[in-house]
Image (tube, rainbow, N blue to C red):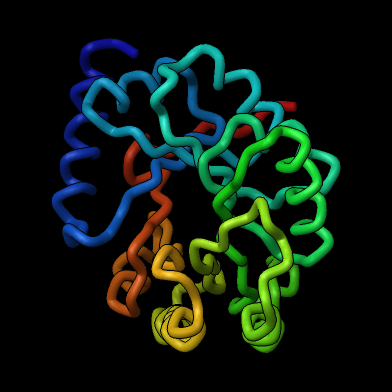
Amino acid sequence: MDALDRSALAARYHQVRSSLPPHVALVAVSKTRTVEEIQALYDLGHRAFGENYPQELREKHPLLPRDIEWHFIGHLQRSNVKHVLPLVDLIHGIDSEKLLDEVEKRAQGLGRSVDVLLQVHIAQEETKHGFSTEEVETLLAHPWRWSRIRPRGLMGMATNTEDHGIVSDEFRTLAGLFERVRKTQEPTFDTLSMGMSGDAPWAIAAGSNLVRIGTALFGERAPRTA
């Protein structure tokens, strides 16, 4: 990036940070962004980055500082768990018990524990992934059977719509579920990940304490190439 780009990135970063309440964590969504862009944001003091694509994460990971906190925020297929698990600190999109089983198996093989968020389907679009609210309540009401996996909270994505009333209602639904189930969980069940560049204010108003921001930080992204 040239000096002007770095200056613009710094301005956007400080604007986003200043808009967030102190209790809300920021994950910079770095999918399709260059190593240079990520490094520039790192140089401003940011450490938490979110990737959506396993291959892209594998390519970037060895080229960037070791103390980056990597989040996997995309839809994770079971066949890719073995590639993603050694590289990440938190998996946001756990959406089935079969995926939990695969993460557990791979974590056992690596001799490590892994933090995850359970993804809840709250949007109107059927293309979005996640447990139903009832499935999450049932899952967390029973003894947790994955010894290498620490459930850290919930994640959800609202409907892609200009109707902020719908978005707010969906976020409030997830926040209500989070407050109900966390009462029966360990104190480390403390993360409610909801809100992106286009809907973060409504997510935060509903109770989010982690937002995933890309465009508002880096600017409009170029189309992803194959």
Tally the marks. 0
Q: Quadrant of residue 151?
A: bottom right
Q: Quadrant of the N terminus?
A: top left
Residue at 68% across / 57% down in the picture? 147
Q: Quadrant of residue 201?
A: bottom left
Q: Quadrant of the C terminus?
A: top right
Residue at 17% across / 58% down in the picture? 22
Q: Position of residue 15 (x, y in %)?
A: 17, 45
Residue in the foreground of this view, choosing between 60 and 10:
60
Q: Is residue 26 visible?
A: yes
Residue at 34% across / 33% down in the picture? 47
Residue in the foreground of this view, choosing between 34 and 225:
34
Residue in the foreground of this view, choosing between 113 and 115:
113
The answer to whether 95 appears left or right of 19 in the picture is right
48 is higher (above) or lower (below) than 166: above
Q: Is residue 170 visible?
A: no
Residue in the foreground of this view, choosing between 217 and 27:
27
150 is higher (above) or lower (below) than 128: above
Q: Position of residue 173 (x, y in %)?
A: 49, 86
The answer to whether 122 appears left or right of 63 in the picture is right
The answer to whether 1 appears left or right of 17 in the picture is right
Q: Position of residue 120 (x, y in %)?
A: 61, 73
The answer to whether 226 appears left or right of 24 in the picture is right
Q: Position of residue 195 (x, y in %)?
A: 41, 63
Residue at 36% across / 69% down in the picture? 208
